[in-house]
Image: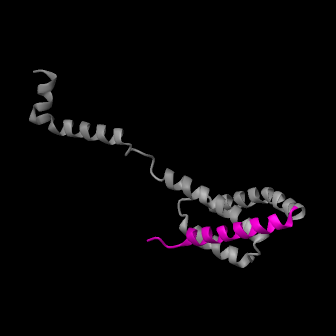
């Protein structure tokens, strides 16, 4: 009996089927670690949201109660984030470092500052609405 005959033999059909399915699954990339993609995405989104919220609070005049409502809604949406509060705070702190540049622009070129803040605040509002929008 040759190796080809082994695969043609009816007793080995389940083995052949299993091996074939395993080969297909492995080569198509269907074997992944569950939750990693969603976890990474939600962690990044939590950090970005914290940074945006800090900017909105400092430059767009967004009230802290509105930011807290947004944070609460977002936290309920980003269920795969490993530590939402820590990620949010990391983003908030990162933006705190970046605000120095905007403050300097406010002093050096008030017109450019006003143009940028207006555009950025509009963009952040749009992003915030989309981040908590129900998609299901």
Q: Residue at x 65, y 67 (%)?
A: 123
Q: Is residue 16 above or below residue 91?
A: above
- Asked whether residue 112 is drawn in magenta, I would say yes
| On screen, residue 65 above or below 15 | below
- Residue 51 position within the rendered picture, expressed as x and y whole percent measured from the top left: 70, 61
Point out the residue furthest to the right here. 107
**Which residue is found at the position 61% from the left and 55% from the top?**
44
Image quarter of the N terminus: top left
Residue 5 placement (x, y as % from top left): 11, 26
The image quadrant of residue 77 is bottom right
Residue shown at the point (70%, 68%) measured from the top left = 119
Residue 21 in the image: state x and y as whole percent.
26, 41
Task: Verify whether residue 81 appears in magenta.
Answer: no
Q: Is residue 135 left or right of residue 30?
A: right
Of residue 135 and residue 36, the one placed in the foreground of this image is: 135
Q: How many marks?
A: 0
Image height of 60 relative to 17, above or below: below
Across and down, in percent, residue 7 comes to 15, 30
- Magenta stretch: helix, strand or loop mostly: helix
The image quadrant where one finds the C terminus is bottom left
Residue 122 found in image quarter: bottom right
Let me know if residue 82 appears in the view: no
28 left or right of 131?
Answer: left
Left or right side of 100 for 57: left
Residue 135 visible at all? yes
Q: Quadrant of residue 103?
A: bottom right
Q: Which stretch is magenta?
A: 109-136
């Amino acid at each position: 009996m040759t190796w080809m005959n082994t695969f043609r033999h009816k007793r080995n059909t389940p083995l052949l089927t299993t091996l074939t399915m395993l080969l297909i699954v492995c080569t198509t990339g269907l074997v992944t670690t569950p939750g990693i993609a969603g976890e990474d995405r939600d962690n990044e989104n939590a950090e970005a949201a914290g940074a945006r919220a800090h900017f909105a609070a400092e430059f767009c005049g967004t009230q802290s109660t509105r930011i807290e409502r947004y944070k609460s809604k977002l936290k309920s949406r980003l269920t795969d984030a490993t530590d939402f509060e820590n990620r949010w705070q990391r983003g908030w702190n990162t933006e705190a470092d970046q605000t120095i540049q905007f403050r300097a622009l406010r002093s050096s070129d008030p017109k450019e500052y006003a143009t940028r803040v207006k555009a950025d605040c509009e963009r952040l509002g749009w992003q915030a609405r989309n981040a908590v929008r129900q998609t299901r």
